[in-house]
Amino acid sequence: MTRIAVGGFLHETNTFAPTKATYADFVHGGGWPSMAHGGDILTTMRNINVGLAGFIGAAQARGWEIAPTIACAASPSAHVTEDAYERIVKALVDGIKAAGQLDAVYLDLHGAMVSEHLDDGEGEILRRVRAVIGNDLPLVASLDLHANVTPEMVEHADALIAYRTYPHVDMADTGRAAAEHLALLLDSGHKYAKAFRQLPFLIPISWQCTNDQPTKGIYQKLAAMQSDAVPTLSFAPGFPAADFAHCGPSVFAYGRTQADADAAADQLAALVEGHEDDFDGRIFTPDEGVLHAMELATRATKPIVIADTQDNPGAGGDSDTTGMLRALVRNNATKAAIGVIHDPEAALAAHVAGVGAVVTLALGGKSGIPGDEPYEETFVVEELSDGKFVAPGPYYGGRDMDMGPSACLRIGDVRVVVGSYKAQLADQSMYRYVGIEPTEQSILVNKSSVHFRADFEPIAEKLLICAAPGAMPADTAALPWTRLRAGVRIRPNGPAFAPETAPRSTSSATG
């Protein structure tokens, strides 16, 4: 029987964000499944939208035996602590060592992990795994669409396969695609040639959405380019908030011959570069966005949905800035709701006070973002929750959520979802769990950039993007870059980066 070791370790790192990812964050998961070890992985990774779940299902359908190691993820944030990284990677590598005779290894990775001591978190994971399994055993990994792919990652893996949707509704599908490519490797007994191209400009995440052009058309053409000669082809627009040399978009192809792989990679790179002008759009200030939403709502039959994009916890924000809440209250918005504001102290105070109580709080604003501070006001406690619910929408895909003690607070006709844990508001259930029916609101403000669209577009009259203070600027040129590779443009058609000092090494000699 074919025997495959599997594991998962995912983190999207915003090196400019205020809060680091600790080991405890990976234990909890923060919107991802909680950390699982060994056989528990086969139980938790079933029928959910996660790469590892898709791979395991496809592998079992093929009759492969699975040797599970560790699976964990944490909400995007600043660097993964050295302690968390080393403990998790040790568990992964030790699990592979203990698995006995293997035919291949599959890893569910993000591709944009930076730790306190390593720029290229995934490159080092793949290097350490390769050192254990040798050069002949196939090693395949699935990646997030926002992966900042490095030469080391390409070198150590036999195939890297990235998601093709943003919102990421195809995470499990990508795990299944990895199983399919691994089957090709096992059946043929030979490896495919690799081609890797890094593109010359950063792409802001708000314009990476695959529901819209140009990204939608790029992925349609990418799918058409795959063939028997090039069975696996990926475009990763990248996560443009990691200050190291290899941050940015890339394409990578696997072909029967080097000429096949090179031709596909060059064609796809030229296609993306040809759309540089199109990665742009309108972004409102908080007051502009709220006033426009209020005006649209006077004739709308469905909610106007605003993305509070710069405090997106899916991009490293702490999900606690108050700029959009202030704009809603300042402009007297009605039938409006915003969430999720991460503030365990405020949630606890609401629980102590009880439903119907009036509480004065300094809400949110605790992450030290310039231009933001706690919002000191008096609120009515309308609903309380233990924070446990299922998120059935397309992005979370039926995951069990745990937001901790939570509350619905009201000020005027504005309702605020307050949680004790942070997770991107990408599912309608993240309003309903505290008693807010999203379809009955005139305005919804989601702390998200794009993922919310998978579940909210069907109920939205109009989608707007607002830029209140937060850790993830909508304009990538606004970030204080110091360590990008020379010549990369810091936004589409923007200025080229000129490094003042050489970047540090992207890998570690330890292992």
Image (tube, grey):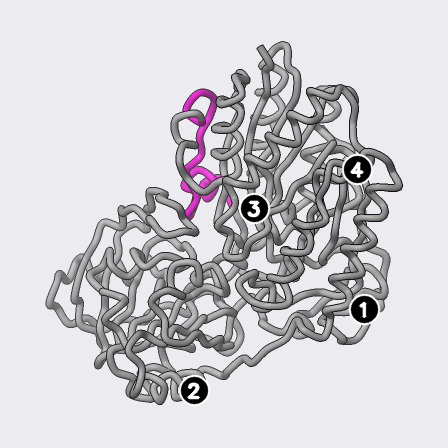
Work out which residue is located at the far right of the displayed protein and give it.
259
Query: Where residue 197 appears, x then y in whole percent?
Result: 81, 51
Q: Residues within 10 Å of mark 1 (few under 14, many from 20)?
A: some
Report the disc number at residue 255: 4
Q: Which mark is first along the chain, 2 or 3?
A: 3
Q: Secondary structure at mark 1?
A: loop
Q: Is residue 422 left or right of residue 167?
A: left
Q: Residue at x 77, y 60 (%)?
A: 483
Query: Where residue 331 appears, x then y in whole percent?
Result: 33, 89
Query: Where residue 449 appears, x then y in whole percent?
Result: 50, 65
Q: Quadrant of residue 45?
A: top left
Q: Is residue 57 left or right of residue 407?
A: right
Q: Quadrant of residue 257?
A: top right
Q: Which mark is first along the chain, 2 or 4?
A: 4
Q: Which mark is first along the chain, 3 or 1?
A: 3
Q: Say if mark 2 contacts mark 1, CB within 8 Å.
A: no
Mark 3–mark 2 Cα distance, whole angstroms, equals 33 Å
Look at mark 3 in the image and give the residue it sits on: 11
Q: Residue at x 33, y 48 (%)?
A: 392
Q: Amino acid at mark 1?
A: Phe
Mark 3–mark 4 Cα distance, whole angstroms, equals 29 Å
Q: Check the picture and name the quadrant holding the N terminus.
A: top right
Q: Residue at x 69, y 47 (%)?
A: 234
Look at mark 2 in the image and give the residue it sits on: 287
Q: Is residue 86 left or right of residue 460?
A: right
Q: Check the picture and name the quadrant holding the C terminus.
A: top right
Viewer-nearest of labels 4 and 2?
4
Report the disc number at residue 497: 1
